[in-house]
Image: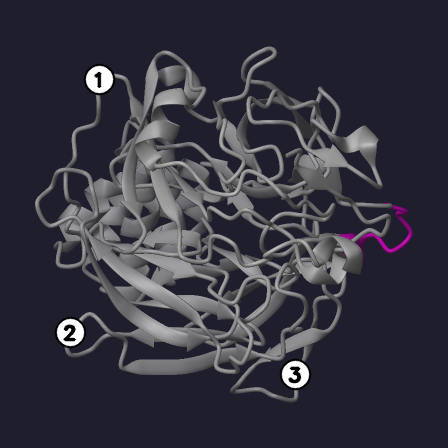
């Protein structure tokens, strides 16, 4: 039976999963086993695909995050697209996975938190995690070591609660010691629970915050999509369904310094191969009813990742990856400077970085792990659309929750494999963390900086000053300066000298 897919004619920004332009299937009736998928997936010859987690340990995964010791938090949106009939309690969960035997497969899983309403992303912080759970951003922590959170603290609230595909998402640690998040195309406002009278408008804007102080601000003009990516130098990129890669050139607040300057947008669409680029899928093509011109092109961009892991072949360093859940692919963009912004070119001509021949392959988000591998989160659903945008006559023949008992996470590694080293940074001393600021893997640099700023240990200051002045790595010196900023110890002469 032929797959069926439809797009709305409205502009509907997507915050969680994918599809501005509706997509759903009548076939195939069942998914394939991960081993079969790996054997037939399209991937460059110098790389290979590995399975790191699957059902029943995880179901409906939509995001992953690694803590300082390499454990993996998996966000599960089990309410998607609607709750099962007769269910009223939120079904969202966060699972905590670990690879205890060091073979690369995360064989243990515990329920870290449950009863979460439409969770979309997680970010480690102060021994726990921050989770976007609209209308809130919450802090969850396990204090007794049983693997389940016993602390739940709402830090920010008021974010709009909309369609499951339209909520806040994409929590990302910034080089400047702020946490950044994507709006998902909503209007409205939000505030810290400590200052309920200080609403911050997020109309047309993404946001950033400092979880320790309650500061909440507008960040960049929003793309209205799911996910953000910050490169090694702190520059911001986003994605939105059709416009698959955009550069947020600068924060709009700077325009207030020149009120007479007319600027239409502070975002730049940087693709040189069309914003809604042609995609080279190997899965059975779908029929797009309302917008047949979008078939085989970006229409369900979801999740954007910057690769700075230092473990894949050098040609992948500094590139960006963007998923499309409709076409079952991960697309690669090679980004180069052009004027005040960038230009993004295809990684390969007439081929995608990762292409699945299974229509149930739904790559939602990606993350670079402590090992330098590129982790691909596959929600693994037959239907990836909300019934709100499916005509009644079509919906009657669909099970919109088909696949709600499945989920996979894959890892892209070099053909010869990866050295799997457990980071164990949570208990590392100051010297070790300062040295990690010059690590070739961005995850290590970001994590070490975060831990040093969280601890607030003044004994790190002289080591950081030395790093900022003398380290051979420009990125190491950069992280040294920003870590000093986070500790309130940055001095102008260091910036000038560095």
Mark 1 crowd level (few <14, some 14–19, many ≥20, 10 Å Cα): few
Mark 2 crowd level (few <14, some 14–19, many ≥20, 10 Å Cα): few
Q: Which SS class for mark 3?
A: loop
Residue 358 at x, y = what percent? Answer: 49, 32
Name above or below for residue 368 compared with residue 9. above
* Quadrant location, the C terminus: top left
- Residue 340 part of the magenta segment: no
Q: Main secondary structure of the magenta part?
A: loop
Lateral position of residue 306 relative to residue 384, left or right? left
Lateral position of residue 157 relative to residue 268, left or right? left
Q: CA distance from mark 1 to mark 3?
A: 54 Å
Q: Image point 63% across, 44% down: which residue?
A: 26
Q: Which SS class for mark 2?
A: loop
Residue 190 at x, y = what percent? Answer: 64, 76
Lateral position of residue 379 relative to residue 462, left or right? right
**Residue with the mark numbered 3:** 198
What is the span of residues highlighted in magenta in the rendered image?
A: 255-263
Residue 267 at x, y = what percent? Answer: 73, 42
**Residue with the mark numbered 1:** 416
Lateral position of residue 188 relative to residue 157, left or right? right
Between 130 and 92, which is closer to the camera in this rendering? 92
- Residue 237 shows up from this direction: no
Most extreme residue toward the left, as rendered? 101
**Residue with the mark numbered 2:** 146
Looking at marks 1 and 2 on the same chain, the residue that comes earlier in the sequence is marked by 2
Q: How is the image coloured?
A: one colour
Q: Image point 54% across, 17% down: which residue?
A: 347
């Amino acid at each position: 039976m032929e797959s069926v897919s439809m797009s709305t004619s409205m502009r509907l920004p997507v915050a969680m999963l994918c599809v501005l332009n509706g997509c759903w299937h009548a076939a195939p009736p069942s998914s394939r086993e991960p081993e079969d998928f790996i054997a037939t997936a399209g991937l460059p010859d110098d790389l290979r695909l590995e399975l790191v987690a699957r059902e029943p340990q995880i179901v409906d995964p939509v995001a992953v995050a690694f803590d300082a010791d390499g454990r993996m938090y998996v966000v599960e949106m089990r309410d998607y697209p609607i709750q099962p009939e007769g269910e009223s309690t939120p079904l969202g969960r966060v699972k905590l996975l670990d690879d205890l035997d060091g073979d690369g497969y995360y064989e243990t899983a515990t329920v870290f938190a449950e009863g979460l309403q439409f969770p979309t992303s997680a970010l480690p912080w102060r021994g726990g995690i921050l989770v976007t759970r609209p209308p809130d951003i919450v802090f969850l922590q396990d204090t007794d070591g049983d693997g389940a959170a016993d602390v739940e603290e709402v830090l920010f609230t008021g974010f709009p609660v909309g369609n499951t595909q339209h909520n806040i998402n994409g929590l990302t640690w910034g080089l400047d010691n702020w946490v950044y998040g994507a709006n998902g195309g909503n209007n409205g406002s939000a505030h810290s629970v400590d200052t309920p009278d200080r609403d911050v408008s997020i109309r047309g804007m993404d946001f950033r915050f400092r979880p320790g102080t309650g500061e909440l601000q507008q960040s960049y003009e929003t793309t209205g999509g799911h996910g953000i990516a910050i490169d090694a130098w702190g520059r911001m990129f986003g994605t939105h369904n059709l416009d698959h890669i955009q550069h947020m050139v600068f924060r709009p607040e700077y325009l207030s310094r020149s009120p007479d300057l007319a600027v239409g947008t502070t975002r730049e669409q940087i693709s040189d191969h069309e914003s809604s680029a042609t995609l080279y899928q190997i899965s059975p093509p779908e029929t797009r009813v309302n917008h047949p011109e979008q078939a085989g092109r970006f229409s369900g961009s979801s999740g954007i990742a910057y690769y700075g892991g230092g473990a894949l072949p050098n040609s992948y360093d500094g590139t960006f990856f963007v998923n499309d859940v409709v076409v079952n692919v991960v697309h690669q963009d090679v980004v180069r400077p052009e004027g005040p912004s960038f230009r993004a070119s295809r990684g390969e001509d007439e081929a995608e970085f990762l292409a699945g021949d299974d229509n149930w392959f739904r790559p939602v988000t990606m993350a670079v792990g402590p090992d330098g591998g590129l982790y691909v989160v596959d929600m693994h659903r037959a239907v990836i659309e909300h019934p709100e945008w499916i005509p009644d006559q079509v919906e009657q023949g669909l099970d919109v929750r088909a696949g709600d008992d499945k989920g996979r996470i894959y890892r892209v590694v070099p053909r010869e494999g990866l050295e799997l080293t457990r980071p164990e940074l949570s208990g590392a001393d100051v010297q070790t963390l300062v040295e990690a600021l010059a690590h070739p893997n961005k995850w290590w640099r970001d994590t070490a900086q975060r831990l040093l700023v969280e601890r607030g240990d003044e004994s790190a200051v002289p080591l950081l000053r030395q790093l900022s002045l003398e380290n051979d790595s420009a990125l190491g010196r950069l992280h040294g300066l920003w870590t000093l900023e986070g500790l309130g110890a940055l001095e102008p002469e260091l910036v000038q000298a560095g």
